Amino acid sequence: MVEEQGGMPTGVPTGVGAGASTGGRASGLVRGPVVHEVPYHAQWESAELVRAIIDGQVDAAEDPRWGQSGAATPEEYAWWSWRLCGVACLRMALDHWWGLAPPALTLAGECVAAGAYVRDGESLRGLIHTPFADYVRRRWGLAAQARELAPAELAAEVAGGRLAMVSVHPAIREPAGPAPVRRGGHLVLVVGATDTAVVIHNPSGFPGESQSFAHVPWRSFERFYAGRGIVLGPPGAGGTGGAGGAGGARSVPDQEPAGN
């Protein structure tokens, strides 16, 4: 496990982006399009190889950028890479607000130390939402709250300048495909909302199709969405909206299966 380092990261928060996308007013969920300019990070170091890795055409250990992850070996990187969707979402949020994206395996080790991941041999229990939110607040100074989120609440959080790591089925990378047999099992970062679509950064999305600023129609999104997540807010925003303390939160299943 990685020893947790004290103190705050250096640098100045970049704040909340205000870029807008187009959209109609079909759903009534938001009063206008809001899309935050959040940097994208895949859960594999080579984002362009995600489709090939998921399709089994390339072994994750063959990712030429594996060393950038902080792993000691390609094999360690390959094992973790399939389980790093939550870490990738955190890296995006940190890059957005702090202007830094620590190596994925460094963050994964800190999450293990914080109890947000529990490793048992070759299996991994995680991401566990409540200790993860506690870790994000303590280590990185962001507002963070694990909670249930109806689609309208999710849209309101984004409109209020926050981001949300939400539990969806991995098949959301192809939202026009058949409905999954279950919801949840994978984490994506919601970076925007329009009246017709939720805008996500998907750590295991396909390059050029469903990785960054992917617009998923609200009606399609609900087929994949488990109704829970972790709302993240900028430094110093504790108590702002729903992302600060526990007030108003409803109980949720605390464990997110490590997915892809």
Image (cartoon, grey):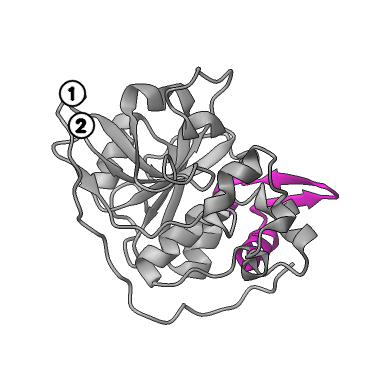
Question: What is the quadrant of residue 254 in the picture?
Answer: top right
Q: Are marks 2 and 1 in contact (CB under 8 Å)?
A: yes
Count of marks overlaid on the render: 2
Above or below, 255 against 240 in this view is above
Residue on which disc 2 sits = 195
Local secondary structure at mark 2: loop
Residue 160 lies in the magenta-colored region: no
Local secondary structure at mark 1: loop
**Residue 80 drawn at (x, y percent):** 70, 54
**Residue 26 drawn at (x, y percent):** 18, 23
**Residue occupying image coordinates x 28% and y 53%:** 36
In the rendered image, which quarter contains the N terminus? bottom right
Q: Which residues are magenta?
A: 105-132
**Residue occupying image coordinates x 36% and y 64%:** 96
Outermost right residue: 121
Left or right: 72 in relation to 149: right
**Residue occupying image coordinates x 46% and y 78%:** 9
Q: Amino acid at mark 2?
A: Asp
Question: What is the quadrant of residue 215 in the picture?
Answer: top left
Callout 1 crowding tier (Cα within 10 Å): few <14, some 14–19, many ≥20: few
Residue on which disc 1 sits = 26
